[in-house]
Image (cartoon, rainbow, N blue to C red):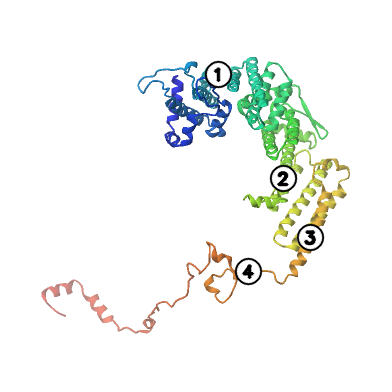
Amino acid sequence: MAAERQGGGGGRGAGAEENKEHKDGKDNKENERPAGPQPGGLGDSLGLEILQIVKESQQQHGLRHGDFQRYRGYCSRRLRRLRKTLNFKMGNRHKFTGKKVTEEILSDNRYLLLILMDAERAWSYAMQLKQEANTEPRKRFHLLSRLRKAVKHAEELERLCESNRVDAKTKLEAQAYMAYLTGMLRFEHQEWKAAMEAFNKCKTIYEKLANAFTEEQAVLYNQRVEEISPNIRYCAYNIGDQSAMNELMQMRLRSGGAEGLLAEKLEALITQTRAKQAATMSEVEWRGRTVPVKIDKVRIFLLGLADNEAAIAQAENEETKERLFESLLSECRDAIQAVREELKPDQKQREHSLENDSGKVSNIQYLHSYLTYIKLSTAIKRNESMAKSLQKALLQQQRSDEDGKRSPRPQDLIRLYDIILQNLVELTQLPGLEEDKNFQKEIGLKTLVYKAYRCFFIAQSYVLVKKWSEALVLYERVLKYAREVQSGAGAHRNSLKELPDVQDLITQVNAEKYSLQAAAILDANDPHETESPSQVKDGKPLSERFETFCLDPSLVSKQVSLVHFPPGFQPIPCKPLFFDLALNHVAFPPLEDKVEQKAKSGLTGYIKGIFGFKS
């Protein structure tokens, strides 16, 4: 109980939120009657929508962002409000007096809600400790203690719901809730068989409840079933069912990464399984050369490469595909870094190998080139996928104008194709492939294809600003690139299958050329073309164009231009400066006689001066 009271103290820390909830009438209503049948007397059945209450509370108070501490504080405050409303206080400020909800006092479904909030508070504290246990392993013991407390409260809730005063639906939900928390506790204890039995019981109850009600009411139950299905498969794998591993990996790849209770355990399990398979992998073949693979991280990456590519191909939406691309690129960068660390101490040996093999790169360098090829090819596929989604959005620009979002522009696609062309340049510079004529030919053809698409969207951007001649020249350049691809494909058609179809581009360019020529003729033959406001007023303020009439919408806007402010500088006459030029032509009187008298005066003159003698 001390730990539970500590959880309540965490709730008191958010005093502003607590005062707000006390004042809010909605929060007071939630303590009056929770969802469920209303009792009219002791003979009426009590009901409580356990799963609905739990889900709504979690989504509204922190769990949408994974903030378990905030949700725990909410549970503590709601418990206190419920006890105050039911006059079911645990003693007073000076003394604690424990009370238990018994079947005799079970006259209101809020007593069931009281126990449910106790269980939720303990569970949320356990999940908070689970997050903190990643850096502080000692907190795992406290985590297990809180989970046991949550299971204890759930058992009490299930026992009370066995009363004849509670309806059948609430009894089933209480049993499912109890089974769910029990399964999570056994899961943390790694008691796989007991955890699997508890999760299966929970899944069975929720499936029956989902079938017994309408589709709208069954949504919550089906969501809970989907949440616990990965846990059941994980338990089955640890028991010995190898088929469950494939299902878990497919679920993880489809979702772009594991979530929830299985997040860390599933990643560790997949890595462990691939590590076992990597023990049997000793070499890899690429472009006719077999290279030994001795680095474990590289082996694990190469084994999972096919699964990752298959998951990307089966992705249901662009967001999932983007997450999978990022995950694959991250793993590839880690593998390349591991190879680079092996390359550093082996530099002298590689130089010696180059001399003996007449320019042939070493095995470790060739493996580095292979991994770099995978990284650049994946980046090209990702950018091409983004370009396709942007092209679809360009065809639906009117929709983006309505919802206030920035509409896609041809410039966005130009940037993507620039990155693709840069990646292709890096592919041609990979060590060990400089003299591979077929490889260089394939990259050259791919470069022409992406150059054609880049030119096409540059032309589209010129069309938007009515630069007809520039757009027409670029369309001709697109056709030139496309014809070069068609003439040079020959034996390389298989490698070009994954690229965009050049024939479709030629058809589209021919159509655009005709529409462009028509628009240019109409634009040239339209003498009554309305001038734009900037052409009419030439940027002059209203004070300088009183004599000219024009429709200026800016006059009724917030940025109206009336006068130049601050005003510009104007030249003014300055105060004249006087220079004495006659000084150079003035002859001053001679002063030689006075200078000589001063020279004769000395000690004798000084004595004569004392006694009054004058010369």
Cα gap from disc 4 to disc 1, whole angstroms: 80 Å
Q: Which residue is mark 1?
A: 161
Q: Residues within 10 Å of mark 3 (few under 14, many from 20)?
A: few
Give the vertical position of 181 relative to 61 (above or below). Answer: above
Q: Amino acid at mark 2?
A: Ser
Disc sitting over residue 535 in the figure: 4
Give the vertical position of 478 relative to 500 (above or below). Answer: below
Cα gap from disc 1 to disc 2, whole angstroms: 53 Å
Secondary structure type for disc 2: helix
Disc sitting over residue 515 in the figure: 3
Query: In which quadrant of the rendered image does the C terminus lie?
Result: bottom left
- The residue sitting at 85% across, 52% down in the picture is 483
As rendered, which of 3 and 280 lies closer to the eye? 3
- In primary-sequence order, the first of circles 3 and 4 is 3
Residue 510 x/y as whole percent? 82, 56
The answer to whether 345 appears left or right of 26 in the picture is right
Secondary structure type for disc 4: helix
Secondary structure type for disc 1: helix
Cα gap from disc 2 to disc 3, whole angstroms: 25 Å
> In this rendering, which labeled residue sits more in front, label 1 or label 3?
1
Q: Amino acid at mark 1?
A: Cys
Q: Decide if residue 408 is in sight here.
A: no
